[in-house]
Structure formats: structure tokens, C-alpha cells
């Protein structure tokens, strides 16, 4: 509820102005998602495959190649943005009522932000216990970047890719753990197969370069269940088929259009030249601190503890740390919009790692000092976030 209240405050602050024109108007990318998503729902072509407008008529904020295809996204984001407008009479979709119907555009992404928080809470409690779960959830609920992305406050909807990638990784790990049960593996796991397929479809559909979670999920499954690798591979393959079918569905099952879009999709697009630029490291550090200011102290302390204290180097801490490092590296390697998606997606994994190490430290003889320090940092983080939210201007 705290997370939702802060996100709603941002939405209210942005949409409180009465007109659709001026600084409070939708950004070019948001307007494109509305227009092309609406057209797709009304048989006006598939969003971004290619765009129905000529490439030279599209804004620079709308990712497209020379042929008018969106190389970074499937139609998922456009469909999700425009879907709430289907319940509004078309005669009301005019600038005079924009401050009302534009609220609807935020609802799917607010729901994604809440779902990611619930997923983080569930996973962190299983990995770190109640203390670690509360710590991770609190850091998430007052994360400026997560609040901003869920509210779409002057930013792109990377929260969808973050939720999909988080769900894909930890669903794969959960599926692998169930392989030790003495049951018919594939049939028994059909719900988790569907859940894993949905997670993969959300991640890749919202950002094509998130396809890295597909082999990453398989790697975790094979590691967690080394004695049932054939079953793990079967389940992973079935989940990939589900994900492919769902991704195909976002193109409304137009086979030719789907194949054309896949040929223009950028599933990699990384450049390692960024790692030679010092400014990139500063920008990444700035983005991580924007995600959670308390990480300025908590993250170095967690990393140092993880290195020098063997007790913290177990799977529950190591797995999210490895994924976070990989996503940060990919964020640095993608100078385009995909980089922002990877950096935001790394945040929930960072929070679980920090919460796990902090929970271990709270079980030492110095637990009282650790608890006092950690919760003092969190209290300061909450106050800082609320103060900044109170200073957000209208429009």
C-alpha cells in the first residue's frame, strides 16, 4: 500500500494539469504506444512490425529501424498501454478529458510494479527468512526508480521487463527444486511450466535483448537439479514453447508479420566499448543509487561481508548476486534504451542479495548493532524518498 500510494502520487502530480498539450502532454514514445496499440486492437496493423507511419514521420523517441520495425520491443507494451482504453467510449478520448483517461494507461504498469513487489517478498522470505524478506520489501517499496517506473513518470515502462526477468529466474529455480519430488515430473509441474513460459514471454516481449534470461534459466535449472537434467531440459523446452506461443499471440497470430519482426529484432546489440569509458561506470553507480539511496552503504558492506565471510556464500545469496552482476554488465554494454531495462531489472536481485547478507549478519553476536545500523539506514532512506516525492512539481 505504501508503494502504491507513492506511485499514485506521482501519477497524480503528472496528470493534474488539465490540457493534453504542453509539458504535461504524453511523451512521443507513450503517444506512439497509445496510437499503435489502439490501431492494432482495431485491425490497423501490428504495432512496430512495422509501424503504420513512415519511418521519417516517427519521433526519435520511438525506436525503429530504416524499415519502420521496432528492433527492441514486441507489440506487448503497446497492447498493454492501449488495452484499458477499450472500456472508454471513443467519444471521450479527447484532449479535454485526458487527465481522466490517461489514468487508465498507468494501471497495467502500476499492477506490474505491485506484482514485482509481491514476487520479491515471496522469494526473499523463502531465501532469507522473515527478517530478510521485510528488509528487501521495505527497500523495494521506497525505491525511487521502481516507483517512477511503475508510475511511468517521465520514463519508459522497463518495470515489465524487470518483473518478467525476475519471475523467469526464480520460477526456473523453483521448478528445479521440485524435480526431487517422486512424481511424474512434467505433468506435475504443468502450472510452473506455464508460469515460467509466461515470465519468459513477458521479459522477452517487453525487451528483445532480455532473451538472455532463457539460457540463464536453463543454467540454473541444470545446476539445482544435476541428477534430473533430462527432466529439467524437458520442462525448460516446454516453457519455451509456451513463451513462443504467447509472444506469437502479441502479433495476433499473423505468421508472416511475426517472422518479419523476428528478422528485424535486436536480440543482442551489445557493445563492449562501454567498459573502457569511465563515465559509464559513474552513470551506472548513479542509477543504482537512484534505485535505492541506502545502497550507498548497504551494498559495499554486503559485498565485503560476502567476500570475507564464507557463511554468506551459499546459493540463496550467490544466485541473485550473479544475476545482478550480469544485468549490470549488460546494462553497460547496451548504450540504447535496453541498457536502462537491464539496470532496472538488476535492482530486485541486488535487494535480495543485500537483504540476505544483512539477515546473516543479524544472527551474529553483534546482531543488535547490525539491526540498529540497518534500520537506521532504511529509516533515513524512507524519509529521503518521501521528502523528494513531496517536492515533485505538477505536470
Image (cartoon, helix red, strand yellow):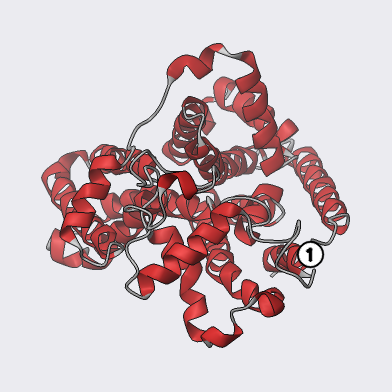
* Image quarter of residue 41: bottom left
In the current view of this chain or complex, which residue is farthest to the top?
276
Residue drawn at x 32%, y 64% is 45
- Percent position of residue 32, x then y: 51, 58
Residue drawn at x 30%, y 57% is 196
Question: Mark 1 sits on what residue?
Answer: 13
**Mark 1 packing: few (<14 Cα in 10 Å), some, or many (20+)?**
some
Residue drawn at x 66%, y 48% is 145
- Percent position of residue 193, x then y: 24, 60
Q: Quadrant of the C terminus?
A: bottom right
Q: Quadrant of the N terminus?
A: bottom right
Residue 180 seen: no
The image shows residue 14, relative to residue 353, as above or below, that is below
- In the figure, is residue 148 to the left or right of 382? left
Q: Nearer the viewer, residue 143 or 12?
A: 12
Residue 67 seen: yes
The image shows residue 321, relative to residue 179, as above or below, that is above
Q: Nearer the viewer, residue 78 or 342?
A: 78
The image shows residue 285, relative to residue 101, as above or below, that is above
Q: Nearer the viewer, residue 329 or 367?
A: 329
Mark 1, secondary structure of its residue:
helix
- Percent position of residue 236, x then y: 20, 50
- Percent position of residue 241, x then y: 18, 56
Residue drawn at x 38%, y 47% is 70
- In the figure, is residue 270 to the left or right of 144? left
Amino acid at each position: 500500500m505504501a508503494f502504491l500510494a507513492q506511485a499514485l502520487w506521482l501519477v497524480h502530480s503528472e496528470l493534474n494539469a488539465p490540457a493534453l498539450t504542453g509539458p504535461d502532454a504524453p511523451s512521443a514514445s507513450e503517444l506512439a504506444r497509445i496510437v499503435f496499440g489502439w490501431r492494432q486492437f482495431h485491425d490497423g496493423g501490428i504495432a512496430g512490425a512495422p509501424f503504420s507511419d513512415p519511418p521519417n514521420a516517427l519521433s526519435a523517441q520511438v525506436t525503429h529501424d530504416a524499415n519502420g520495425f521496432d528492433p527492441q520491443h514486441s507489440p506487448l507494451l503497446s497492447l498493454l498501454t492501449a488495452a484499458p482504453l477499450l472500456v472508454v467510449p471513443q467519444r471521450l478520448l479527447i484532449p479535454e478529458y485526458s487527465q481522466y483517461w490517461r489514468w487508465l494507461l498507468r494501471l497495467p504498469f502500476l499492477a506490474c510494479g505491485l506484482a514485482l513487489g509481491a514476487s520479491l517478498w515471496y522469494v526473499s522470505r523463502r531465501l532469507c527468512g522473515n527478517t530478510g524478506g521485510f528488509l528487501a520489501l521495505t527497500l523495494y517499496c521506497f525505491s525511487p526508480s521502481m516507483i517512477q517506473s511503475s508510475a511511468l513518470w517521465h520514463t519508459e515502462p522497463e518495470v515489465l521487463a524487470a518483473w518478467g526477468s525476475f519471475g523467469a529466474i526464480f520460477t526456473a529455480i523453483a521448478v528445479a527444486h521440485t524435480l526431487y519430488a517422486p512424481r511424474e515430473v512434467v505433468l506435475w509441474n504443468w502450472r510452473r511450466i506455464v508460469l515460467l513460459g509466461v515470465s519468459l514471454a513477458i521479459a522477452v516481449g517487453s525487451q528483445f535483448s532480455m532473451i538472455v534470461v532463457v539460457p540463464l534459466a536453463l543454467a540454473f535449472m541444470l545446476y539445482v537439479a544435476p541428477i534430473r537434467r533430462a527432466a529439467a531440459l524437458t520442462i525448460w523446452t516446454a516453457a519455451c514453447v509456451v513463451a513462443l506461443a504467447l509472444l506469437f499471440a502479441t502479433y495476433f497470430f499473423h505468421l508472416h508479420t511475426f517472422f518479419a519482426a523476428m528478422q528485424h529484432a535486436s536480440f543482442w546489440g551489445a557493445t563492449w566499448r562501454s567498459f573502457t569509458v569511465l563515465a559509464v561506470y559513474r552513470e551506472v553507480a548513479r542509477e543504482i543509487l537512484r534505485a535505492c539511496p541506502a545502497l550507498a552503504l548497504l551494498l559495499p558492506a554486503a559485498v565485503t561481508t560476502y567476500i570475507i565471510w564464507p557463511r554468506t556464500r551459499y546459493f540463496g545469496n550467490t544466485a541473485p548476486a550473479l544475476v545482478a552482476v550480469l544485468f549490470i554488465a549488460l546494462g553497460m554494454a547496451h548504450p540504447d534504451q535496453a541498457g536502462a531495462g537491464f539496470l532496472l531489472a538488476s535492482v530486485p536481485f541486488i535487494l535480495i542479495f543485500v537483504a540476505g547478507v544483512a539477515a546473516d549478519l543479524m544472527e551474529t553476536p553483534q546482531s543488535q548493532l547490525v539491526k540498529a545500523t540497518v534500520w537506521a539506514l532504511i529509516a533515513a532512506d524512507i524519509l529521503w524518498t518521501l521528502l523528494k516525492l513531496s517536492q515533485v512539481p505538477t505536470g
